Image (cartoon, rainbow, N blue to C red):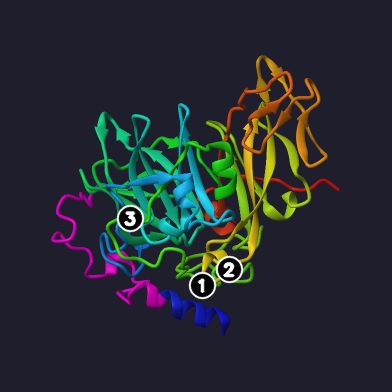
Amino acid sequence: MKQFLLTLLLFGFLCLNGIGVPFAESNSFSRIEWPKTDFNKRSIKLEEILSGGPPKDGIPAIDTPSFISVVSAQNWLSDFEPVISVEINGKAKAYPLQILMFHEIVNDDLNGKAISVTFCPLCNTSIVFSRWVNGQKLDFGTTGRLRNSDLIMYDRQTESWWQQFTGEALIGSYTGTQLEELTSQIVSFNTFYTQYPDGQVLSRKTGFSRQYGKNPYRGYDDINNTPFLMRGQIDDRLPPMERVLSVTTEKNAKIYPFSVLTESNVFPDVLGNISLVIFNTGQIYSALDASTIRQSKTVPAYTVFSTEIEAQTLHFYWQNNSIYDRETSSKWNVMGKAVDGKLKGKQLKPMKQGVHFAFAWLAFNPDVEIYRQSN
């Protein structure tokens, strides 16, 4: 019954417009709606795609974002609200999930680099991509379609369709092309502005009228729920709605269930031949729990860094509510910056990381290594 009521809520939000109908069977397969898309060029079966409800651009991307200071954002953004933190060459911006919830894509430029900041609420997945592909600058919008419960984007230049979770073009002239993923982190607003006091925050003045701060997916992240509009067999190695932290390199990937991370503030590990460390940054509000985000339950947030710096490998430990390295006794914050000691001012290199529901990661990456606690 709980899942049924949740589904009704989701149906109400998604406009009851052909929800769950396979794309190949729906009247959405239209040259009027998609005049540029080459549907003959594709890497998947059209039957894998379902209608999420809204039509093309029914969930509108933000194409001309405006930004405010962290001080101004404190008037409406609470300390523990989740934001997507992106830093490029010393310039940083925060994109609150309370805004991304209603837009899913922000086409932006940060310190001279064209980026798309994306968030799929159904997979709890935020990923940042470069918008440059083969010398062409792309702008992304929402198709209104899903695959494995994940957002399918499209670029407005060629109307090729792209999987948000993987960054791969599925349909159209760009089929098989991979977007460049950029480093980003999900942290609390407090963590962001402590690290970047001069950082900028995406403004609520988006040009659209939305109930920012509300959560239209109330109760969705209950670990006992099932994914919305997920077809086929769900991998049972982890609870489908358990949050996992992913860490990836060009050759390797590993996911860490939150259940194995919760008791450690400093969590060292190795991925391939790279030594890494996971820092617990503290609690943030879930964006997918209560109907109002700031009244939601809290969940942990994590950052991940390579431990290699200045030709040495550091080993970190937690003491007196702070992080130190054994080699120099320098003190570090959770954003990987040395704030005191011999290495003061040095910055650890962040790893590519993400937070997702387990079902989504396992659907797209079934062969991934899952971190297991040793006996």
Rendered residue at 46%/64% (across/down) = 213
State the residue at coordinates (63%, 22%): 346
Q: Where residue 101 appears, x then y in whole percent? A: 43, 60
What separation in Å lies between label 2 and label 3 (alpha carbons)?
23 Å
Of labels 1 and 3, earlier in sequence is 3
Q: Which residues are magenta?
A: 11-40
Tag 1's secondary structure? loop
Give me the residue at 22% from left, 70% from top.
Answer: 27
| Viewport quadrant of the N terminus | bottom right
Say whether residue 322 is left or right of residue 59: right
Q: Position of residue 72 (x, y in %)?
A: 44, 49
Q: On screen, 287 above or below 310?
A: below
The image's mark for residue 295 is 2
Up the image or down, 61 lies above or below 330; here it is below
The residue closer to the viewer here, 65 or 223, is: 65
* Amino acid type assigned to the residue bearing label 1 in the image: Ser
Residue 205 is tagged as 3
| Disc 1: which residue | 291
Q: Secondary structure at mark 3?
A: loop
